Amino acid sequence: MSVTELPPRPWVMACGCSTTAVRRLPDGSSYPVCFPHYGIDPGAETLIEPDAQPSLEGRRARCAYFNAALGRCNDTRHNRFSEKSGKVGDYLSEIESSWTLPFFEHCPDQEFDKFFCGCWGWD
């Protein structure tokens, strides 16, 4: 399936992540892939159709670098991902789950889903 034939984003992959990349082939075709799981999890190349995507209702996501003992991420030097709270620079390492969060991963067998809040920077 080519990118031009896909439903609107966010694209959700069978590995449980929203897509973070598009693989372009030498013949000019392309398809979405989950970059962190590509080559590790076969679901990283399998798109879930929008009507089959799991519900995120009532779920929360924590940054993948969240440290429960500290109640925050380990590194606090960088800018944080900010929810639409009206406060610039809010420290948010836990947020309502959404397929549009950066590097989002749905973890149905765990208490929290995962995303990246920017605690290690964006470069």
Image (cartoon, grey):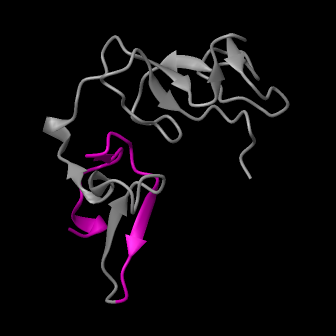
Q: Position of residue 11 (x, y in %)?
A: 32, 48
For the residue pair 57 and 42, the one nearer the viewer reads as: 42
For the residue pair 114 and 96, the one nearer the viewer reads as: 114
Q: Which residues are magenta?
A: 1-26
Q: How many marks?
A: 0
Q: Is residue 5 magenta?
A: yes
* Residue drawn at (28%, 67%) of the image: 4
State the residue lying farthest toward the right. Answer: 77
State the residue lying farthest toward the bottom. Answer: 27
* Residue drawn at (42%, 23%) of the image: 97
Q: State left or right for residue 80 relative to residue 66.
A: right
Magenta span: helix, strand or loop, mainly? loop
For the residue pair 74 and 10, the one nearer the viewer reads as: 74
In the image, is residue 49 above or below residue 80?
below
Q: Is residue 27 magenta?
A: no
Q: Position of residue 63 (x, y in %)?
A: 58, 27
